[in-house]
Amino acid sequence: MPSADRAAAVPVGAPLAGVEGLLDRLGQVVDPRDPRGVRYRLATLLAIGVCAMSSVGHNSLTAIAEWVRRCDQRELGQLGCPFDPFTGRYRVPDERTLRDAYGRVDPVDLTAAGYGHLATLARPGPTPLTPDGVGEREQRRAHRSAAANPPRRAAIAVDGKCLRGAKRPDGSQVFILSAVRHSDAVTVAAREIGAKTNEIPEFAPLLDQISDADLTDTVITVDALHAQRAHAVYLVEQRHAHYLFTVKDNQPTLAAQLRALPWKQVPVLHRQTNRGHGRHEIREVQVVTVDDLLFPHARQVVRIRRRRRRPDTKTWTIEVVYAITDLPTHQARPEEIAAWARDHWTIENSVHWIRDVTFGEDASQVRTHNTPTVMAALRDIVRGTIRLAGWANTASARRAHTNPAAALALHGIP
């Protein structure tokens, strides 16, 4: 169908969706622009970024602007672009319009809207069909992941990431602290860390973005930097959540106490053997029950011994990690603790690595106001949607959505 005929098929001013979809959710983001002279809805500009980045090669604002220029009239109408009655065509935003809008958006507000959309997609229901074009290897990986026996409690990983290519006007680098669900790698909350602070004081404000319904009785896993007494008190007493903190030498007294426990007399309660990624790994878990002596609300101390070797050698490398949790033995079995400790790396493997390698985040040099953090939030929406749609490989999914119509269909834009 020619472009002019396709444009006529989209009624001017017709609602974009009969149900609350991506555009409706993005419409909940507060528009900070002066309403005088605004031509494009903020939801439309944000949706353009999401759909463009769903297609391989569109990682920058310049590429996003090129993507929307290649959309036909019907697709522009679906995205909510304004209709010009004098030309009989939908208007197309340029790069400057996108850059100005993204620089003003509140990243916290955008992350909340994105999580609300992804939470709707992740509601329990029929198992989604594996999309056409996903290879057999990816199907097997997805099947193994779905068949795994998950712990009884949901878990959220908290970790920070540096956007290496982005810098503030004073030359400082941009850091983002994120909270990501273990089960599906969906970003629940994100917060930019100020130039004159660090991750530790931003921990509670980050989790304050998460509702009580999503945080109550959930296990929060963090690395050694966040093994802070104040964090434990905040989680258990204020948010009614649980913690699993890794302990290293940044807490020397606590680390020394954990090492001094009689581990030689403690049996190995869980052992797991894995082969993959070019190595053979054996994990052994030992657990000691304590009574609020070492740390606020502490109930169990965990020792995880990891032995690794490459298939072409007989030499093993050994790493010993200590962790502490407020959950007693009847609420957290050794295999569950081992799963939470292992799945904490979801935030590195399924979030940070994918944003860096697949979306080229560290190569991005956008620096205008909130743009770096807003672009990171848009990448998280794309990444989460692809994963919840059943794709095991994000790069493969992006290659499958090079056509704008396919990208709009992926995000349910009617």
Image (spheres, helix red, strand yellow):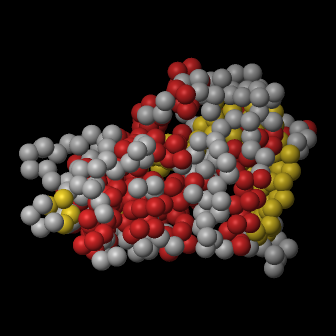
Q: Is residue 191 above or below residue 229?
A: below
Quadrant of the rendering where the N terminus is positioned: bottom left
Q: Is residue 152 left or right of residue 51?
A: right
Q: Position of residue 196 (x, y in %)?
A: 31, 44
Q: Position of residue 85 (x, y in %)?
A: 12, 60
Q: Position of residue 303 (x, y in %)?
A: 77, 43
Q: Is residue 369 above or below residue 132?
A: above
Q: Nearer the viewer, residue 258 or 27?
A: 27
- Which residue lies at the image location 23% right of the left edge and 43% below the top edge? 31
Q: Position of residue 246 (x, y in %)?
A: 64, 42
Quadrant of the rendering where the C terminus is positioned: bottom left
Q: Is residue 219 above or below residue 414?
A: above
- Which residue lies at the image location 69% right of the left edge and 61% below the top edge? 142
- Which residue lies at the image location 66% right of the left edge and 23% below the top edge? 297
Q: Nearer the viewer, residue 295 or 116?
A: 116
Q: Nearer the viewer, residue 399 or 274?
A: 399
- Which residue lies at the image location 43% right of the left edge and 34% below the top edge? 209
Q: Is residue 358 left or right of residue 2?
A: right
